[in-house]
Each structure stands twice: as C-alpha cells, then as structure tokens.
C-alpha cells in the first residue's frame, strides 16, 4: 500500500475537524427558539445513567444553582430549563474570553417508561437530577 499523500491527509483532517466543530456548535449553541418559547436557547451537554432504582442525569451547568433549574416530565420526556447568567458583580467586567454559554438553556431527554420523583443536587460543576423510580 502506498504511503498517504501528506497534502490530501492534511486536507482530509482539516475538513473532519471543521465538521466536528460544526456538529458541536449545533449541539451546544443551538440558539433558536424552542417550541412554546420566543427566547433563543442552547442545549447543555448531559450524561444519563440508569440503575434498578433510579435514573441519574448529570447536566454540565457550572455556576448554576440547582434550585433555579426547572425540571418537569411531559409525556415521557424530561424537560430541563433555566438561565445561565454572569454573576451581578461581573456584569460590568471587561470580557477577555467567554466560552461557557450564557442565557436560556433547555434540554429534552426521553425517559424510559415509568413514574419518577425528581430531586436535584450539585456535583463537580454539574447539576444532578435523581429520578427515583416509583411504582
């Protein structure tokens, strides 16, 4: 097999990197109004795990108070929403770099069939939602 052409390899790698960046931007910074809302929102990344007794959801929302995150189940879909904003003491600061999304967020997560009781907690920069299974 002949060695890879370095120019084609670099071009292919660059195109793949741009495509990955586009997918990430669409996933996390999808600033479009969601159903029933006129305000643009973004989707935070999540992890969803299930045990015999509960579904655990970890949402990457550093600096957001868990008590200010809305979580409700609507027809088998968990809807998590809220706002991530700069603390008041930093609102007049000169921004040197701002990579964490601000503003309204909303994430919809299809749940396994069942009934759940929701509780919230904060852990390592994430908001945790514990959905205890009930019969």
Image (tube, rainbow, N blue to C red):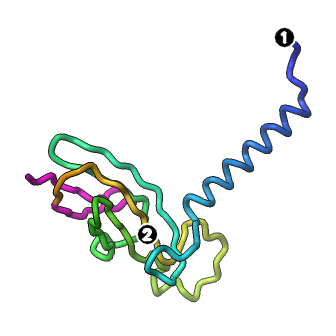
Vertical relation: 48 (above or below) 97: above
Residue 103: assigned label? none
Task: Check residue 123 for magenta coloring.
Answer: yes
Vertical relation: 31 (above or below) 48: below
First reached walking from the N terminus: tag 1 or tag 2 = 1
Q: Distance between the residues labelled 1 and 2?
A: 49 Å
Write down the residue under mark 1: 1
Residue depicted at 41% across the width and 70% down the height: 63
The segment highlighted magenta reads 117-135
Residue depicted at 21% across the width and 56% down the height: 131
* Left or right relative to 18: residue 79: left
Which secondary structure type mostly characterizes the magenta part of the structure? Answer: strand
Residue 106: assigned label? 2
User: Looking at this rendering, what residue extends furthest in the front direction?
Assistant: 75
* Left or right relative to 57: residue 45: right
Q: Do the residues labelled 1 and 2 touch (CB within 8 Å)?
A: no
Identify the image quadrant of residue 91. Answer: bottom right
Residue depicted at 39% across the width and 75% down the height: 82
Task: Check residue 24 for magenta coloring.
Answer: no
- Residue 47 % position (x, y): 39, 49
- Residue 106 % position (x, y): 43, 69
Give the structural element (helix, strand or loop) at label 1. loop
- Residue 94 % position (x, y): 64, 82
């Amino acid at each position: 097999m002949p060695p890879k052409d370095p120019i084609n390899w670099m071009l292919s790698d660059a195109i793949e990197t741009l495509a990955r960046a586009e997918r990430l931007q669409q996933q996390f910074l999808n600033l479009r109004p969601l159903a029933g809302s006129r305000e643009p929102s973004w989707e935070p990344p999540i992890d969803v795990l299930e045990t015999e007794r509960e579904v655990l959801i970890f949402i990457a929302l550093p600096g957001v108070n868990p008590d200010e995150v809305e979580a409700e189940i609507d027809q088998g879909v968990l809807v998590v929403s809220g706002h991530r904003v700069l603390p008041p003491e930093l609102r007049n600061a000169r921004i040197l770099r701002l990579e964490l999304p601000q503003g309204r967020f909303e994430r919809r997560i299809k749940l396994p069939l069942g009934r759940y009781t929701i509780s919230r907690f904060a852990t390592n920069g994430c908001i945790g939602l514990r959905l205890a299974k009930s019969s």
